[in-house]
Image (cartoon, rainbow, N blue to C red):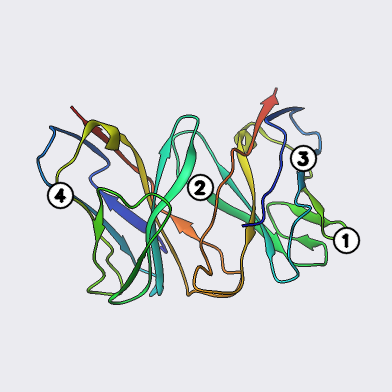
């Protein structure tokens, strides 16, 4: 089954403790991205990647890092999480950049930073 | 980025058609019109997209105005499962940010039994 998976689905952590949220897709997609969703602010893009080793900032990249060493994986790294990064995070992928291809979203990771 | 305007909320009765409007008066000639929806506690889900012509798929129909400044997502028979937030998004098909979806606030659709 074609899908985007994220782990963990739920995470409670403390300020400053480094964490990684994994994202994996099994569709051989070139393009992957991360979004966060907050009440009243909607979905905002954090980072995106157009292919292996090619990443770029989205609208709200501060406090986050990403890497794209393999085509299928696109982890989101919070080196020193803060309470304002408490949010619902979605990973997404599409076959490639350019063209009207649909984007597939993961089920979400709910992160709480205390 | 070209913006879209949607009503904050709409209500429908089950098994009746629903027409969800979207205005995008600053759309450029190469922008695709995409619709996604987000069911409660789930990630967004692709619904349909189009460029100039009306489009149909198993989920919905998309009617695009001749001047492309507005479009309407049509659910032919709403079910309770269609209760979701529907997003109308213009997908830029040029430049380095190709493929980046910019979500607005969307329309929250409620379906009454």
Is label 3 in a helix, a strand or a loop? loop
> How far is disc 2 from disc 1 in space, using C-alphas?
28 Å
Is label 4 in a helix, a strand or a loop? loop
Which image quarter is the N terminus of chain B in?
A: bottom right
The crowd level at tag 4 (other Cα within 10 Å; few <14, some 14-19, many 20+) is some
Pinpoint the chain carrying mark 4: A
Is label 2 in a helix, a strand or a loop? loop
Which image quarter is the C terminus of chain B in?
A: top right
Q: Nearer the viewer, residue B76 or B62?
A: B62
Q: Are marks 3 and 4 in contact (CB under 8 Å)?
A: no
Q: Which residue is mark 4?
A: A79
Q: Which residue is mark 3?
A: B77
The crowd level at tag 3 (other Cα within 10 Å; few <14, some 14-19, many 20+) is some
Pinpoint the chain carrying mark 2: B
Q: Which residue is mark 1?
A: B67
Q: Which residue is mark 2?
A: B44
Which residue corresponds to the image point at 18% horizontal and 40% vertical from the top-left? A81
Q: Please identify, in this view, whether the residue under mark 2 or under mark 1 is nearer the observer.
A: 1
The percent position of residue A93, horizontal first and vertical second, equals: 42, 63
Q: Where on the picture, by quarter, is residue A88?
A: top left
The first of marks 3 and 1 along the sequence is: 1
Asked if badges 3 and 4 are on one and the same chain, I answer no
Q: Please identify, in this view, whether the residue under mark 2 or under mark 4 is nearer the observer.
A: 4
Q: Are marks 3 and 1 in contact (CB under 8 Å)?
A: no
Which residue corresponds to the image point at 71% horizontal and 39% vertical from the top-left? B6
The first of marks 2 and 1 along the sequence is: 2
């Amino acid at each position: 089954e074609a899908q985007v998976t994220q782990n963990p689905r739920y995470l409670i952590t403390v300020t400053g403790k480094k964490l990684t949220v994994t994202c994996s897709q099994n569709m051989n997609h070139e393009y992957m991205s991360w979004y966060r969703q907050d009440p009243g602010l909607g979905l905002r893009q954090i980072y995106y990647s157009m292919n292996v080793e090619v990443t770029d900032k989205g609208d709200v990249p501060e406090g986050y890092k990403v890497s794209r060493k393999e085509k299928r994986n696109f982890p989101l790294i919070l080196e020193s999480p803060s309470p304002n990064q408490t949010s619902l995070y979605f990973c997404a992928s599409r076959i490639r950049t350019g063209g009207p291809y649909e984007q597939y979203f993961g089920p979400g990771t709910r992160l709480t930073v205390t | 980025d070209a913006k879209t305007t949607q009503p904050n909320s709409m209500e429908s009765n089950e098994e009746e058609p629903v027409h969800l409007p979207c205005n995008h008066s600053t759309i450029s000639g190469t922008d695709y019109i995409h619709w996604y929806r987000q069911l409660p506690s789930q990630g967004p889900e692709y619904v349909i997209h189009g460029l100039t012509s009306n489009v149909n798929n198993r989920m919905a129909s998309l009617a695009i105005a001749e001047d492309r400044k507005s479009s309407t997502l049509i659910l032919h028979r709403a079910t309770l499962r269609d209760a979701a937030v529907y997003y109308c998004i213009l997908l830029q098909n040029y430049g380095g940010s190709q493929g980046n979806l910019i979500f607005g606030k969307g329309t929250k659709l409620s379906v009454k039994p």
